[in-house]
Each structure stands twice: as structure tokens, then as C-alpha cells.
Amino acid sequence: MTQTEIANLPPAFLRNSVTYSVVITDMEGNYSYVNDLFKKRFAFLGIDFIGKPFQVAMHHGDVDNAIAVVHQCFAFPDRVFPIDIRKPSNNHNEFHWTQWEFSLLKDAVGNPIGILCVGHDITEAQRVNQLLRLSESKLRAILDSTSDNYVLISPEYKILSFNKQASRMAELVFGKPLEVGANMDEFVLPMDKVDFYADTRRALNGECLHFEREIFYGEESSWIEVYYVPVYEEDGTLVGFTFNSINISERKSSELKILEQNNRLKQITWQQSHELRRHVVNVMGLYNIIKLDEKISAEEKLQHLDDLLKEVKELDYIIHSIVSISLG
């Protein structure tokens, strides 16, 4: 076929496209046609592409992949094969990312005459994806370095994502690590399942929950602070909910000690204001009777002294009790 005939093979909208580059290579892999957009994008190469091998406008690391796709085109002549190819840039330290579709090109009687390639630039999309992957990598590093447990769970209770600490905790409690796609039901303690599903249904209905709970596993227990937070896509579609738990056993232990101390102080205060005061009043009354009442007999005085001794012993017992309570 003549050069003009080959150039007229692609539809006019592709030949004149401002979005898609169109390339035809012959059976030997040399350019036999390129549209104006392709010429414009790679004009900095200073090459008259016609007759040149396809490698002149391709990153050397993608040549083998391109050849493999060409072989697929010959093996399956009625199919289209996608491929991402790095193209040269006028900045020698960079390159363009492009996405192409290769298919076998045939003449009017069905004989193969080369490869038709239609592609467009995806450099900006690739750059955004790289930034997104970098951002996700940084976020993952932050989540994996924390001692908190993070798990993202779908509305069907499938595990979508988790950090290392959550997986380590699952292995400690359940004897196996978390896995993406696993059912969260496998990682809920039997005694907690009723509360777990009741709470998480509220989260799936848009409610944020925060509470503290003591969990028991084997012969051990821990206090955890739990957050259930619904997660949405930008368009408002519900993704699921996050389960975030923080081990607060040390803080809880301190709080319980303070509470215990306060209870002891209350008990001491009550004993001082009631029991001690009662016995002191009794001692003072017996003392006044013995000292001031001249009419009592010697026998009555001895009885009052015995009562006085009994009250003093009671006071001594209460004082020891208070000391014992204050020491815990």
C-alpha cells in the first residue's frame, strides 16, 4: 500500500484528534504513519518518524513489553490489547506516561499489514496516583507506628483494612492475624458479640460511638477505649465504619486506685464523724459521772469504770481499723 493509502486507513476523527495519538507500524515495526498530535507531542526529538523503528519514541524499559503485545495482536487478530508505555520528554530527567491500545491492521482482503496503535497521555493521572500512593504510604506508616488498633470494616462486616497493631492484637487474643476480606465476626469475643453488633449497627446508621470496656481473654483482661466512626465516600456513599481501640489499662488502673482511695477516705470520715464521736461522748459522760456524782456507790463506780474501759477499747479498735483502711 502507498503512504497515502496507509494514512487514510484510520478514521478522520482519529487522524485529526487533539486527544489521541495515532500510530501505524509496518510488519517490521517501523513507523508508516503518525498523526499530527503525535508529531506535535514529540517534535522535540527532531525525528521524521516515517520509516524509523518504533523504539525511537519509547522508553527502553518498555520495548520488550510492547513487542510482547504485538505478538499477541498477531496471535489474536480480532482483539485489542491495552498497554502503558513511557514516552520521552523534553526534560531528560522525566518521561511521559501514555496508555495505548494495539490491534492488528489488515488490508481490504484481510491480510495483516502492521499494527494500529491509539494512545493518550496519562502523565497527570499517573502523577496524582503516585502522590496518592505516597500519601497512603505515609498514612500507613503513621498507623503502623501507633499502639492504637485501627480496622476498617464494610457494611457486610468484611475487613477492608487494618494496621499492624490491630493484627498483632488479633493474633494475641484469637490466635490468628487479621486478613483483608475476612469476616469480622471471627475477631469478636463471644461475650461481646451482642454489644458489638448493637453498637456497630448504630455506627452504620451514621452515629459515632465512644465508650470504655473491659475485655477478657484467657486468664487476662484489659481495659480499652473504643471508637466506632462511620466512613463515607466523597459522594456520601457509606464505605463502612472504623473500629479504633486504645489500651487504657494503665490509666484505668490509676483511676481505680484513686476511686478506691476516695472510698477509703469517705469510710474514714464516716467512722470519725459517727463511731469515734459516739464513743468519745460516752467516755466523757462516764468520766463526768464518776468524778462529779457524789451519790454513786463504790459498786456503781466500779461498774462505770468497767464501762469506761470498754469504751476506750472500742476507741482503740476503731483507731486501728482507720489506720488499716488508710494503708489499704
Image (cartoon, rainbow, N blue to C red):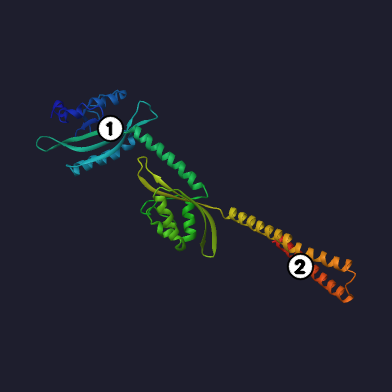
Instruction: Quadrant for residue 264, please give it.
Output: bottom right
Residue at image location 81% in from the left, 72% down from the top: 307
Q: Amino acid at mark 2?
A: Tyr
Q: Which mark is residue 120?
A: 1
User: Dot 1: what SS?
Assistant: strand
- Disc 2 marks which residue? 317
Q: Which mark is residue 211?
A: none
Point out residue 129 in the picture as x, y percentages from the top left corner: 37, 37
Residue at image location 24% in from the left, 28% down from the top: 52
250 relative to 166 in the view: left or right:
right
Which is more N-terminal, label 1 or label 2?
A: 1
Quadrant in which the N terminus is drawn:
top left
Quadrant in which the C terminus is drawn:
bottom right
Point out residue 120 in the picture as x, y percentages from the top left corner: 27, 32
Residue 227, compared with residue 298, is above or below; it is: above
What is the spatial separation of the Cα atoms under label 2 and label 1, in whole angstroms? Answer: 94 Å
252 relative to 45 in the view: left or right:
right
Residue 255, compared with residue 129, is above or below; it is: below
Badge 1: residue crowd in 10 Å (few <14, some 14–19, many ≥20): some
Q: Amino acid at mark 1?
A: His
Of all residues shown, which one is farthest toward the left?
A: 109
Instruction: Quadrant for residue 277, please give it.
Output: bottom right
Q: Nearer the viewer, mark 2 or mark 1?
A: 2
Instruction: Quadrant for residue 64, please give it.
Output: top left
70 relative to 251 in the view: left or right:
left
